[in-house]
């Protein structure tokens, strides 16, 4: 993973270096050293295990954010949401009763 790729991923997820560092249990300086340009004296290569951990944490974060957004939207306008999408068995029973 290139330093610029990591920086773009972090920004795309709306995270600061400190927030990403907290998620990964590393220091913010370590995140900044990963993001430093390759020729920079502050640049540190990301280890393969750290790279996998970063991608895994960002995927988990994205999933949690989508879930939070859905819940917040459902609470904000309950008439637009029903239990049906969350309970597939209910939808199947309703379809069976119509047929």
Image: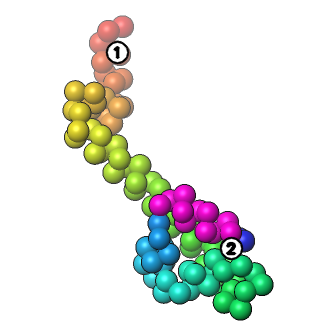
Residues at discs 1 and 2 in contact (Cβ within 8 Å): no
Residue 48 lies in the magenta-colored region: no
In the image, residue 98 above or below residue 44? above
Residue 22 in percent (x, y) is at 42, 78
Q: Is residue 94 above or below residue 39?
A: above
| Cα–Cα gap, marks 1 and 2 | 54 Å
Residue 66 position, x and y percent, is 41, 49
- Specify the quadrant of the image occupied by residue 76: top left
Q: Residue 42's quadrant in the figure?
A: bottom right
How many tags in the picture?
Answer: 2
Which residue is depicted at the point 68% across and 73% down? 3
Taking the view exactly as shown, the residue that stands out farthest to the bottom is: 41
Q: Residue furthest top?
A: 99
Which portion, as a residue range, is magenta? 3-14
Spot occupied by residue 41 in the image (x, y as percentages of width and height): 71, 92
Image-quadrant location for residue 37: bottom right
The residue at the point 22 percent across, 27 percent down is 79
Q: Residue at x 22, y 40 (%)?
A: 75
Residue at image point 61% right, 68% down = 7
Please name which of the two marks, 1 or 2, marks the residue nearer to the observer.
2
Q: Give the mark, 1 or 2, whose residue is nearer the N terminus.
A: 2
Dominant SS type (magenta): helix
Q: Which residue is mark 2?
A: 3
Circle 1 is placed at which residue position? 96
Residue farthest to the right, as pictured: 39
Left or right, 51 with reference to 11? right
* Relative depth, front residue between 94 and 44: 44
Give SS at disc 1.
helix
Whether residue 12 is in magenta: the answer is: yes
Against 8, residue 81 (above or below) is above
Number of the label disc, if any, that sits on residue 17: none
- Categorize mark 1 by other alpha carbons within 10 Å: few (<14), some (14-19), many (20+): few
């Amino acid at each position: 993973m290139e330093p610029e790729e990591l920086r773009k991923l972090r920004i795309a997820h709306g995270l600061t270096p400190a927030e990403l560092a907290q998620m990964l249990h590393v220091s913010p300086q370590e995140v900044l050293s990963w993001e430093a340009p390759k020729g920079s004296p502050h640049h540190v290569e990301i280890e393969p295990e750290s790279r996998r951990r970063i991608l895994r944490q960002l995927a988990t974060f994205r999933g949690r954010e989508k879930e939070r957004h859905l819940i917040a939207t459902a609470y904000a306008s309950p008439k637009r949401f029903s239990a049906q999408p969350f309970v597939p068995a209910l939808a199947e029973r309703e379809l069976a009763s119509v047929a």
